[in-house]
Amino acid sequence: MKIVEFLRPDAVIANLSGQTGQATLAELCRPLASAYKVDGQRLLETLLEREKLGSTGIGEGVAIPHGKVPGLPGLIAAFGRSTTGIDFRAIDGRPTHLFFALFAPENSAGAHLKALARISRIFKNATFREALLRAGSADEIFRLIEAEDAKY
Amino acid sequence: MPTEPLPTALLLAAVGILLAASVLASRASGRLGLPVALLFLLVGMLAGSEGLGQIAFEDYALTFRIGTVALTLILFDGGLNTDLASLRRVLAPATALATVGVAGTAAVMALGARALGLGPTEALLVGAIVSSTDAAAVFSVLRGAGVSIRQRLAHLLEVESGVNDPMAVILTLAVTGALVAGERPGAGIALDVVLQLAIGLAGGVAVGYAGRWLLARARLSATGLYPVLTIALACFAFGAPTLVHGSGFVAVYAAAVVLGNGPLPYATGLRRVHDAIAWFSQVAMFLLLGLLAFPSRLASVAGPGLFLGLFLAFVARPLVVILLLLPFRLPLREIAFISWVGLRGAVPIMLATFPVLAGLPVARHVFDLVFFVVVVSAVVQGTSIGWVARRLGLEVQATPTPRAMLEIHSTQRLAGEVISFYVERASAVAGSRISELTIPEGSAVMLVARGRELVAARGRTVLEPGDHVYVFTSPEDKAFVQLLFGRQEED
């Protein structure tokens, strides 16, 4: 499984403008709603439901909000970068800069978990995280993710 | 005079009866919506010289001493259980509330007391004494009413009350000291406060790190000796900084936070012991304070006491909280809730014994007033907290408690821990077989508690919403395991 199989270049946002966690999640859902013709509000509610259980901010400035949505064709994802950082109640208490939102169809538990593992794996690399923060455009961010993803 | 061991036997029999009565009385807390501490206080009053028990007790010095020890142990337990990451998230607003907020509350309360016709010194003393809150009171009411509030809000309230007692203590001692010396309390107090807080903090952190070092190298032969060592650290963390003009309460809390966030040997056991000690301290302190009160004298201050209690709840606390928290851009609903839950606990009553000891002429009147304010605060705010939390939409769904617990007991420093999770529909793992979980090699699902059953964690076992799942995780995998499972259960 490769991340680029479910992350499209047009679902990468180089500069998230939201100031709060909820605004940021809404921003991440927007490109997915238009690209895959799904209800953006539904996507957002799914993410918020999961955040209620505990933040998906896994520390080191990374968050992986996720959830299952019935009726999706397959895994879909969006990536966004906040240069200023957002208080996402991450487990290390530090601001979150890199958001990777992942959605899976209702019956795809296995694929969903594999994708989460893969995503959290690539973000373990500190050099990669710094490169993402420095990248000049959404295209460059996508290429960086693609290249990092190909390593494993 | 009867000879020993009879007096000791009598004392122990009485203590036994009082402690047991208090513990059993606590069961009524949920039904009545009253903080458990208030019930302990009532048991003490019932047993007192004017109650059924006819126990004549009027030793303010002993009360102050036992109260200080009890508070030290309670703060130590609070610090041990304060997670550094959550502390960091609420540090700025909590610190503002615990320092400037306490001073502000004291000032506004002094104005209120002035309005009642109290002298300026008396008013200032009352203000300083009732200026700090008690988180244990808040949480005992919330738990009793079956209400859970948002985590950050809960942490903010907890940290606020964990760190605001020192400020009230310093203010009270400073005002009393100035009064005894016949001076007007002035700007010197502000400088003194900063000095005491700084020395206390530095001393506490130092004791905390020294304690870590000691615990890691102690290699004690019996596990039961570890809590003795931590109790020693708590006593020392209070005592040593206080001797060099630091705030002992800040120090003991800081030392415990440093210890609690480090690698503690025998951690689960230690936490349990300190939890029990904190409860014991709470019961003992409130019982003693109840014994010390004279209901007949309280009746004579009912009018002013009620006024001050209501003034605190409706004017002083809200005013100070709103002014201080607005710059932090917290949701207004949360600010409203924090304004309302300024419950007072044992600290004000204990502090009120200090002017009595210092021999101030107004002291007994102040003591009675403070006692009344605490009771009013506990009753008015205590009985309404659950309702207010629901009305403000701050309640979150609490997870049911599992019927079984799995934990590791170890005297050695171990990498890795057992975490329990409550599986909800929104958890990524819900509906998955354990074999499908992409947990790294160093971690594993160990046990599933489902309803009345314990289910073996086999590859084929499907995790269902409502399951309590125990996962062993190494430190490096913890973040990922939390990402997959979602809601971690508190112990």
Image (cartoon, helix red, strand yellow):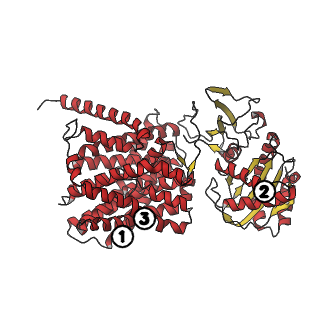
Measure the C-alpha gap from mark 1 to mark 2.
Answer: 54 Å
> In which quadrant will I find the C terminus of chain B?
top right
| Residue situated in front as seen by the camera: A17 or B256 | A17
Amino acid type at circle 3 is: Gly
- How many numbered discs sit on the rendered protein? 3
Chain bearing tag 2 is: A
Tell whether B128 sits left or right of B90: left
| Residue situated in front as seen by the camera: B233 or B317 | B317
Q: Are marks 1 and 3 on the same chain?
A: yes
Mark 2: secondary structure: helix
Tell whether B33 sits left or right of B401: left
Mark 3: secondary structure: helix
Q: In the image, which disc is placed on residue A40? A: 2
Chain bearing tag 3 is: B
Amino acid type at circle 1 is: Ala
The answer to whether residue B192 is seen in the rendering is yes
Q: Which residue is the extreme one toward the bottom?
A: B187
Q: Residue A133, percent across and down? A: 75, 65
| Mark 2 surroundings within 10 Å by alpha-carbon count, few (fewer than 14), some (14 through 19), many (20 or more) | some
Q: In the image, which disc is placed on residue B101? A: 3
Measure the C-alpha gap from mark 1 to mark 3.
Answer: 14 Å
The residue mark sitting in front, 1 or 2, is 2
Q: Residue B280, percent across and down? A: 37, 39
Please name the residue that numbered disc 1 is placed on.
B190
Residue beneath the point at 57% across and 34% down: B408
